[in-house]
């Protein structure tokens, strides 16, 4: 018996049976099989083939054709995807799934003007569509029409207060919505025993939105150890892509002992799916010697909450000093309306209150346990008031501990 011919015959029968089964399947059955191929098997060519077979049976089945357009998009066949979406919208201009999928295609392929046209057309039929409103805000933000993006997000958040993606985008749009901002802050720090005189800190800032991202300049004042000092600081948040942006910072002061002589920082941020944000970077301080610290954080929006976990790692000759903090915000309105709670250990190089304690003079890393509260509130849209309070159980030198209470107040004006 010729086994090769036998097995070949069995193969032909199997293939013919499968083809017959597919030809005999309904358009709904083919659609479900195509979805399984795309989502579970990541087999896009098979999903495309099955979708075409389903459309041969039901050419006006819009759900299948929109799905086919999505698979074409994922496969990089953008012209075929556009043809599928246009086919649906020509026959059914009120199809919100087609509008969203088509608009998303153009947005992610740097054609935001076309994406805005598509989403606006879809919103005429579905003015409360959460997907279309969020996409419209993203497109307007990309087109630098920040005020319109902010208004669209306000509408969406009123409809869906727990929309985490809307809150995440609102944070980024808020600074962009106004070209300029000025602000002032003041902190009063009381010690229960370590220092006889309180510390006082004040800061004046001016920020401007540019085509590359926001730039903020600060003049910082501090009175520590009965000594006055001034620091000059410049921060920038350049946009790199729709996913990435950066933080770049530098500061200088002649008053070493009240401030570090120089301070620098860099972080790369990534806006991730499911309303996550990740960061990695470094901080550099110079008093009389150099200190390098490395930081990483992960943030997550969930309904009206924002959660953030951060760590700072400081290598030394014998060990790595570690600092951790967790912050939670509860949004009561827009991006500048929230209550905040933070708990942490260690000293942060981004915290102006205790940064001077990192000037330790030896390899021993001071410890700290702290809790903080903040309340931010927007008044007449462009005015932001905030108050802060924190309590630190702080080690000031080896095994010498004390408590410090910080009360702060601030104001921002956008214009």
Image: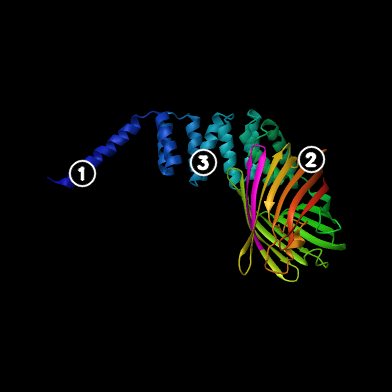
Label 1: few (<14), some (14–19) or many (≥20) C-alpha neighbours in 10 Å: few
Residue holding disc 1: 7
The residue where tag 3 is placed is: 81
Front position among marks 2 and 3? 2
Secondary structure beneath label 2: strand
Q: Nearer the viewer, mark 3 or mark 1?
A: 1
Mark 3–mark 1 Cα distance, whole angstroms, equals 40 Å
Secondary structure of the residue carrying tag 3 is helix
- Give the Cα separation between the discs numbered 2 and 3: 45 Å
Horizontal and vertical percent position of residue 220: 83, 58
Residue 237 drawn at (x, y percent): 71, 55
Q: Residue lying furthest bottom in this view?
A: 288
Whether the residues at callouts 3 and 1 have beta carbons within 8 Å, the answer is no
Query: Which comes sooner in the sequence, label 2 or label 1?
Result: 1
Instruction: For residue 176, say whether it is visible.
Output: no
Viewer-side residue, 47 vs 243? 243
- Residue ID at (64%, 42%): 301
Q: Badge 3 local density, few (<14 within 10 Å), some, or many (20+)? A: many
**Image quadrant for the N terminus?**
top left
Residue stretch in magenta: 293-312
Query: Whole-percent x and y of residue 350?
Result: 72, 57
Residue at the left extreme, as displayed: 1
Disc with the residue nearer the chain's start (3 vs 1) = 1
Question: Dot 2 corresponds to which residue?
Answer: 377
Q: Residue at x 47, y 29 (%)?
A: 61
Horizontal and vertical percent position of residue 51: 43, 36
- 101 to the left or right of 326: left
| Nearer to me, 210 or 336 | 336
């Amino acid at each position: 018996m010729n086994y090769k011919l036998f097995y070949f015959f069995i193969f032909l029968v199997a293939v013919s049976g499968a083809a017959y089964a597919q030809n005999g399947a309904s358009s709904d059955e083919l659609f479900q099989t195509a979805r399984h191929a795309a989502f579970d098997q990541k087999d896009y060519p098979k999903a495309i083939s099955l979708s075409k077979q389903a459309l041969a049976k039901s050419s006006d089945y819009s759900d299948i054709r929109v799905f086919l357009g999505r698979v074409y998009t994922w496969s990089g066949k953008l012209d075929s995807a556009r043809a599928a979406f246009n086919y649906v919208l020509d026959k059914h201009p009120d199809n919100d799934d087609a509008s969203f999928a088509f608009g998303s295609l153009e947005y992610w392929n740097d054609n935001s003007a076309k994406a805005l046209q598509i989403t606006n057309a879809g919103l005429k039929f579905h003015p409360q569509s959460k997907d279309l409103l969020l996409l419209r805000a993203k497109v307007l933000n990309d087109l630098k029409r920040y005020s319109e993006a902010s208004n669209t997000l306000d509408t969406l958040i009123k409809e869906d207060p727990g929309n985490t993606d809307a809150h995440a985008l609102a944070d980024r749009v808020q600074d962009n919505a106004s070209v300029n901002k000025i602000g002032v802050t003041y902190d009063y720090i009381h010690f229960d025993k370590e220092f006889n005189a309180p510390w006082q800190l004040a800061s004046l800032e001016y920020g401007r939105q540019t085509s590359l991202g926001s730039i903020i300049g600060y003049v910082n004042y501090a009175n520590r150890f009965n000594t006055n000092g001034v620091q000059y600081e410049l921060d920038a948040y350049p946009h790199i892509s729709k996913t990435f942006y950066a933080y770049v910072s530098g500061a200088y002061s002649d008053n070493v002992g009240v401030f570090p002589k120089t301070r620098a920082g860099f972080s790369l941020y990534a806006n991730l799916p499911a309303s996550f944000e990740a960061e990695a970077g470094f901080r550099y301080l110079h008093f009389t010697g150099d200190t390098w610290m490395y930081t990483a954080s992960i943030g997550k929006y969930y309904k009206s909450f924002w959660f953030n976990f951060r760590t700072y790692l400081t290598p030394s000759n014998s060990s790595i000093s570690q600092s951790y903090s967790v912050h939670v915000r509860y949004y009561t309105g827009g991006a500048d309306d929230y209550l905040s709670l933070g708990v942490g250990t260690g000293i942060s190089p981004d915290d102006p209150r205790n940064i001077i304690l990192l000037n330790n003079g030896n390899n021993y890393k001071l410890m700290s346990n702290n809790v903080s509260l903040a309340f931010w509130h927007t008044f007449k849209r462009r005015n932001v008031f905030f108050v802060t309070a924190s309590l630190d159980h702080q080690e000031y030198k080896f095994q010498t501990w004390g408590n410090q209470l910080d009360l702060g107040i601030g104001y921002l004006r956008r214009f």
